[in-house]
Image: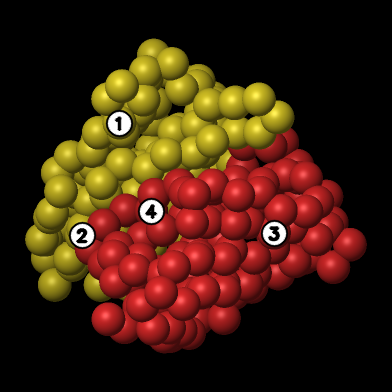
Amino acid sequence: EAGVAQSPRYKIIEKRQSVAFWCNPISGHATLYWYQQILGQGPKLLIQFQNNGVVDDSQLPKDRFSAERLKGVDSTLKIQPAKLEDSAVYLCASSLVHGATYEQYFGPGTRLTVT
Amino acid sequence: QKEVEQNSGPLSVPEGAIASLNCTYSDRGSQSFFWYRQYSGKSPELIMFIYSNGDKEDGRFTAQLNKASQYVSLLIRDSQPSDSATYLCAVNGDTGNQFYFGTGTSLTVIP
């Protein structure tokens, strides 16, 4: 079974530029997540989708970040304009119920450096 | 916001010893608890989950859950240098498919 796919793997941009990340979840996983992980910290949820709909975007900086999940499969996360503090790894994950709980699996991540 | 606390470490153990990683959580409504391993420069990898009080064993790994004390731990027996990584504890939220992470504990297994 293929895992969660993300691209690009690395991105370097200057502040005030824009950037977009793409994610393709595991086939059949209805729930998709975008996390931000700053070095030395745990993943922080930015946005969670259930099929096409947003379940939680309470920690998404909506003045600069946007995300969409068209057709309930692939998703894109955009930052515009980027700030220095956006330098982090952006992780996409998907989950599926398995027995009594949900299991969540991560993609390889995109390492963003803002200079 | 659900609070998940872990000792950031670093935790160092000699090869062959038992490594013990601990996690506490704030929300008594949390039902499932997860341990992820994250190698440097890699993404988190799910290694175990537990949702019933007591112990759950999987190979060299044992997860322990005490809901009354809001405490979950991970024991790694016969630690190997390849176990050197950061271990993330996560708990789920009210809907079951929301996950809240601790900051992770860095483990080094010394050959």
Residue neighbourhood size for the residue with mark 3, other residues' Cα within 10 Å, grouped as few (<14), some (14–19), many (≥20): many
Left or right: where does residue B104 sit relative to residue B2?
left
Q: Chain of mark 2?
A: A
Location of residue B22 with respect to A112 vertically, above or below: below
Residue A80: percent from left, percent from top? 27, 52
Q: Nearer the viewer, residue B20 or A93?
A: B20
Instruction: Judge left or right: residue B65 versus residue B14.
Output: right
Judging by the rendered image, the residue that carries numbered circle 1 is A3
| Three-letter code, disc 1 | Gly
Give the number of the mark in front: 3 or 2. Answer: 3
Please, what secondary structure does the residue beneath circle 1 have? loop
Marks 1 and 3 close (CB-CB < 8 Å):
no
Q: Are marks 4 and 1 in contact (CB under 8 Å)?
A: no
From the image, tell me which residue sits under label 4: B44
* Res A77 seen here: yes
The reply to whether callout 2 and callout 4 are in contact (CB within 8 Å) is no
Q: Earlier in the sequence, mark 3 or mark 4?
A: 4
The reply to whether the C-beta atoms of the residues labelled 3 and 2 are less than 8 Å apart is no
**Which color has been applied to chain B in this rendered view?**
red
- Left or right, A50 with reference to B17: right
- Between label 1 and label 3, give the one nearer the viewer: 3
- The residue sitting at 18% across, 40% down in the picture is A7
Helix, strand or loop for disc 4: loop
Residue A36 locus on image (x, y percent): 39, 57
Asked if B99 appears above or below A30 in the picture, the reply is below
Q: Mark 2 — residue?
A: A112
Specify the colour of chain A.
yellow
